[in-house]
Amino acid sequence: MIEFNINNWVRVKLTEHGRRHHRQKNEALLWEHGADYQPPEEDAEGWSKWQLWDLMNEFGDGISMAGPLMFETTIQILVEENR
Protein backbone atom coordinates (compact mmCIF):
# COMPACT_ATOMS: atom_id res chain seq x y z
CA MET A 1 0.00 0.00 0.00
CA ILE A 2 1.10 3.53 -0.70
CA GLU A 3 -0.29 6.64 0.97
CA PHE A 4 -0.99 9.60 -1.27
CA ASN A 5 -2.17 12.99 -0.10
CA ILE A 6 -4.49 14.89 -2.43
CA ASN A 7 -2.20 17.90 -2.02
CA ASN A 8 0.60 15.93 -3.72
CA TRP A 9 1.54 16.33 -7.38
CA VAL A 10 0.56 14.32 -10.44
CA ARG A 11 1.09 14.81 -14.15
CA VAL A 12 -1.48 14.21 -16.87
CA LYS A 13 -1.78 14.65 -20.62
CA LEU A 14 -4.85 16.75 -21.32
CA THR A 15 -6.96 15.93 -24.35
CA GLU A 16 -8.31 18.65 -26.66
CA HIS A 17 -11.67 18.17 -24.93
CA GLY A 18 -9.97 18.74 -21.55
CA ARG A 19 -8.21 21.86 -22.81
CA ARG A 20 -11.52 23.30 -24.11
CA HIS A 21 -13.25 22.44 -20.82
CA HIS A 22 -10.51 24.18 -18.81
CA ARG A 23 -10.63 27.27 -21.01
CA GLN A 24 -14.43 27.57 -20.89
CA LYS A 25 -14.54 27.02 -17.14
CA ASN A 26 -11.89 29.65 -16.42
CA GLU A 27 -12.44 32.34 -19.07
CA ALA A 28 -15.68 33.70 -17.63
CA LEU A 29 -14.27 33.93 -14.11
CA LEU A 30 -11.08 35.60 -15.29
CA TRP A 31 -12.95 38.05 -17.52
CA GLU A 32 -14.89 39.31 -14.49
CA HIS A 33 -11.55 40.15 -12.85
CA GLY A 34 -9.92 41.65 -15.94
CA ALA A 35 -7.39 38.85 -16.33
CA ASP A 36 -6.44 36.93 -19.44
CA TYR A 37 -6.82 33.17 -19.69
CA GLN A 38 -3.61 31.18 -19.27
CA PRO A 39 -3.76 27.52 -20.32
CA PRO A 40 -2.08 24.89 -18.15
CA GLU A 41 1.65 24.74 -18.78
CA GLU A 42 2.64 21.61 -20.72
CA ASP A 43 6.06 20.15 -21.42
CA ALA A 44 7.24 19.10 -24.89
CA GLU A 45 5.48 15.73 -24.51
CA GLY A 46 2.16 17.28 -23.43
CA TRP A 47 2.35 16.56 -19.67
CA SER A 48 0.95 19.15 -17.26
CA LYS A 49 1.51 19.17 -13.49
CA TRP A 50 -1.33 19.43 -10.95
CA GLN A 51 -1.96 18.93 -7.28
CA LEU A 52 -4.46 16.08 -7.25
CA TRP A 53 -7.17 18.15 -5.51
CA ASP A 54 -6.83 20.86 -8.19
CA LEU A 55 -7.06 18.31 -11.01
CA MET A 56 -10.27 16.95 -9.45
CA ASN A 57 -11.62 20.48 -8.96
CA GLU A 58 -10.89 21.56 -12.53
CA PHE A 59 -12.13 18.47 -14.35
CA GLY A 60 -14.32 16.46 -11.96
CA ASP A 61 -17.56 18.02 -13.19
CA GLY A 62 -16.76 16.88 -16.73
CA ILE A 63 -15.64 13.32 -16.02
CA SER A 64 -18.06 10.46 -16.63
CA MET A 65 -17.84 6.79 -17.50
CA ALA A 66 -19.07 7.20 -21.07
CA GLY A 67 -18.08 10.80 -21.78
CA PRO A 68 -15.10 12.13 -23.69
CA LEU A 69 -11.82 12.03 -21.78
CA MET A 70 -10.52 15.19 -20.12
CA PHE A 71 -7.02 13.69 -19.94
CA GLU A 72 -5.41 10.42 -20.91
CA THR A 73 -6.12 7.59 -18.49
CA THR A 74 -2.46 7.07 -17.50
CA ILE A 75 -1.20 9.58 -14.95
CA GLN A 76 2.21 10.04 -13.37
CA ILE A 77 2.45 10.31 -9.58
CA LEU A 78 5.45 12.46 -8.75
CA VAL A 79 6.77 10.47 -5.80
CA GLU A 80 10.06 12.31 -5.29
CA GLU A 81 8.42 15.75 -5.29
CA ASN A 82 5.74 14.59 -2.85
CA ARG A 83 8.15 13.63 -0.05
Image (tube, helix red, strand yellow):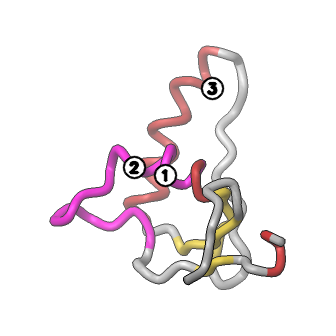
Pointers 2 and 3 in contact (C-beta within 8 Å):
no
Q: Secondary structure at mark 3?
A: helix
Placement of 35 over or under 37, stated as above or below? above
Q: Which residue is mark 2?
A: 60
Compared across the picture, whether 83 is left or right of 69 comes to: right
Q: Position of residue 72 (x, y in %)?
A: 43, 77
Going from the N terminus, do you reach mark 1 or mark 3 first?
Answer: 3
Q: Indicate the quadrant where residue 77 lies.
A: bottom right
Residue 20 is left or right of residue 10, and the answer is left
Q: Residue shown at 35%/44% (left/top)?
A: 61
Residue 5 horizontal/vertical position (percent): 65, 60
Between 7 and 76, which is closer to the camera in this rendering?
7
Looking at numbered disc 2 in the image, what kind of residue is underneath it? Gly
* Neighbourhood count class around disc 3 (C-alpha, 10 Å): few under 14, some 14–19, many 20 upward: few
Cβ atoms under marks 1 and 2 closer than 8 Å: yes
- Say what amino acid the circle numbered 1 marks: Met
Which is more foreground, mark 1 or mark 3?
1
Disc marking residue 46: none
Q: Residues within 10 Å of mark 1 (few under 14, many from 20)?
A: some
Does the magenta portion include 58?
yes
Q: Which residues are magenta?
A: 54-71
